[in-house]
Image: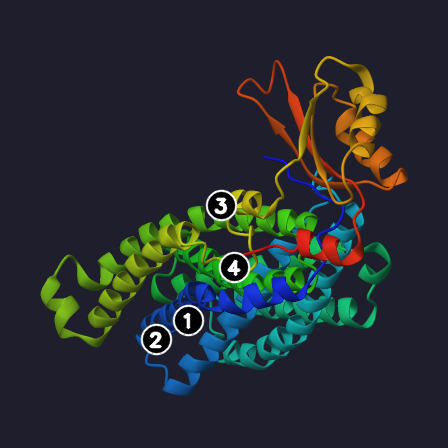
Amino acid sequence: MGVGADAFPRSSAFAEAHQGLGNRHVLPRVAFGILLAVSLAGTAITVGTHGASLPVVLLRWAYLVSAALAAGGSLWWAAFVREEPDAGDRQAVDRFARREVGRLLRILPVAATGLVVSSLHLLRLTRPGVSWLVGLLEVLVAAVAALTASLTLCPRHRARGWRDGRRWVLLASSAGLLAGTGVLDAALQAPGNAAAAALRGLHVLAFGLWLGGAAWNLWVAIPAAQEDPRVAVVVAAARQLERFRWTVRVALPTLAVTGVLQAVPYAGGSFAYLAGTWVGRLILVKAGALVILIGIFITCPLWRACSPVRGMCNLRDLEDALPRPARSLDNRGKPCAGFVHVQRALQALEPGGVLELLSTDPISWWELPAWARQNGYEVLDQRVVGRYRVLWRTYRFLLARAAAPAARDERMAVRA
């Protein structure tokens, strides 16, 4: 469903509504905390069984989390942030993307620094057969650090918005770092076992992309949308979040399947081993945490708990915030949406009045908003309606006649 508007400015009513919705933001934070705890448990199982000390376990965990922040953040930047030409206000969407990139570049230096420092523990794993892999991982660490420095010190994105080709190189480097670390773990435990290497590599990669994407949602996308919560921005943020949900839909079963297959060599199907050893108990903890994460993933959109920004969880929530039209004009079958009739209908409205317009002219999707802006009218909403959208599309617009500033602010505030 396409939703667009020229402006939904911030207001005191909007800010007060969001303060009351703060408790809805708990579930994503809980999920992020569970992911961190599960990753620590998995690191303890993988590295601890090699006889590594607690400091080494913590270093490996910090290394994985740092790589995950870089990989998940660059995935969101590269694949989820898009132009959204039908969202309405393209300039607002572009500013939103710029704010997102700016926030990411405050997180990336911290992640890169943690990655460089924690990667030193890899040197102790150098041994015949895996030395080349350790060297490759160190090269990838250096690449992530260099790209982060380049993005921070040479911020080309400020001139080009979010369209910076380096984001793809950062994604490839950080994702390769995660998968390569999993392969290294498997090579140390089961040398020459390609299946074990593939399982561990997929497991670590799925974890990293999920954790990094969750961090972007919490500390990049949501705060950037809250700074300018007009409809076009909310539409762009909601679509980004939905793309991330598809990542989670792939990551969840990947983690479950690869986790079970990796646990079999430890437990061998013995519940006594699972209940009687520290490794077995950590495996059970990870399994229970995964069940909780599945529950959160299912209930979060149902409770509109993905974000405190109204409409970001589900764009249908924006419909209640739109005003009721004072008049409806059916211009279906008329070329150019019948602009003469539209202008007459708008001029007949009281200041601040809203007109519902129906059109079947495909050009009206782009032409009508431009015409409205030029003539001083506001496009509050635009979408495709009708059951048979492929063969016979109907375009629905909500147009508003200019109102006094105070009345306009009150009408356009997004009410929770």
Please tell me which of labels 3 and 1 falls first in the chain: 1
What residue would you read off at disc 1?
Answer: 33
Name which residue type carries label 3: Trp
Assign a secondary structure to mark 3: helix
Please tell me which of labels 2 and 1 falls first in the chain: 1
In front here: 275 or 332?
332
Q: Is residue 308 above or below residue 398?
A: below
What residue would you read off at disc 2?
Answer: 44
What residue would you read off at disc 3?
Answer: 246
Task: Point out the frontmost of discs 1 and 4.
Answer: 4
What residue would you read off at disc 4?
Answer: 307
Name which residue type carries label 4: Ser
Alpha carbon separation for disc pair 3 and 4: 17 Å
Residue at 68 percent across and 73 percent down: it is: 106
Assign a secondary structure to mark 4: loop
Q: Name the quadrant of the N terminus.
A: top right
